[in-house]
Image: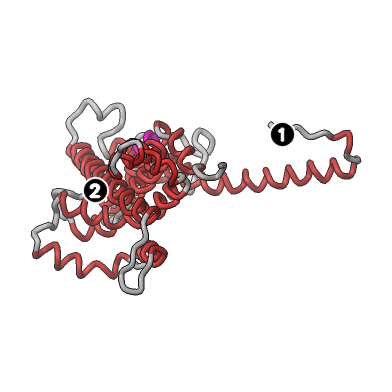
Amino acid sequence: MVRIDFEKYGRGQRIRWWAMRLAVYGLLAIWACVCIFPLFWTVSTSFKTAADVMRGNLIPWFNFAPSWLGWRSLGLSPDTIPQISTVRDEFMRRLWNSVIISVTASALAVVLGSLAAYGLSRFSYKFGHMRNSDISFFFLSQLIMPPVVLALPFLVLYKELALLDTYAGMIAVYTLMVLPIVVWIMRDQFATIPVELEEAALVDGLSVWGAFARIIVPLVLPGMVAAFLLALILCWNEYFFAALLTSTNTNTLPVMIASQTGSQGINWWSMAALSTAGILPLVIVGVVLEKHIIAGMTAGAVK
């Protein structure tokens, strides 16, 4: 903690210092409320009735009495969990599909992205007029392209290869989707590691792959965890390709959440309950990997 010696400051300077501090923390508090409000609205809406949703009531036990209506419609309320529920079975199937596809695609993207980033940070490449910086920008440019541009090519290609509504097809497209951001994250991670460490390992008799696996990977592991979590979030929340390339077998949770509409309109309470249930796994993963995430984000900040 930084201690401020106020004795050497005049009263006006102390007042300005406290005013500045209050202003900064006040703005941060306001921004935190803005960021947290959508999450609060989603969770609170999952415990509202239709009338509470229409009235726009926000604060539980003050504006409205919490109800299990949204969770009961999914078979996830305390009174319906012991019972057989086809909706709950469908939810668990979609959840399992999201877990398999997102985790596998994120892990594969981290492995491939780490290898590509290591090569870009340690070796010099030349493909025509393209150099390392051009190749890195090429990876980043893939994030600029709207996914809808790839809709028809992927649909035709997947139909010819019989990959529609398959785990392999979804894992492949999700891996390609998050690979560019993983390459950029890991390239910065490898750039912070001195080349002398690898040279010393090579002198000691290790091969290039041995130095990479035994020396470099342990040092960049926090960054790999952070990249994995970011890729997992992007894959978990992806809707466009999941709706386009799946039908029954590999539909993911976002597709089920978006389908909570009926002849009377959108079932906000059911959609909110589904969204809350879909957010919880990411929250748990974030809490478990918190130390690695912070270490990965701050790697290279202090040398």
Which quadrant holds residue 273? top left
- Look at the numbered disc 1 and give the secondary structure of its residue: loop
Indicate yes or no whether the magenta region holds residue 296.
no
Q: Is residue 163 above or below residue 48?
A: below
Which is nearer the N-term, disc 1 or disc 2?
1
Say whether residue 123 is visible: yes
Residue at the location (14% across, 54% down)? 165
Q: Quadrant of residue 131?
A: bottom left
Find residue 13 and report its image quarter: top right
Q: Which residue is mark 1?
A: 2
Magenta stretch bounds:
281-285
Rendered-image quadrant of the N terminus: top right
Are the residues flagged by discs 1 and 2 in contact, CB closer than 8 Å?
A: no
Q: Which residue is mark 2?
A: 252
Looking at numbered disc 1 in the image, what kind of residue is underneath it? Val
Q: Residue at x 44, y 44 (%)?
A: 196
- The kind of residue on which mark 2 rests is Thr
Q: Is residue 197 left or right of residue 28?
A: left
For the point 28% across and 50% down, which residue is it? 112
Residue 284 among magenta residues: yes
Badge 1: few (under 14), some or many (20 or more) residues near its Cα, within 10 Å?
Answer: few
Which one is nearer the viewer's eye here, 274 or 209? 209
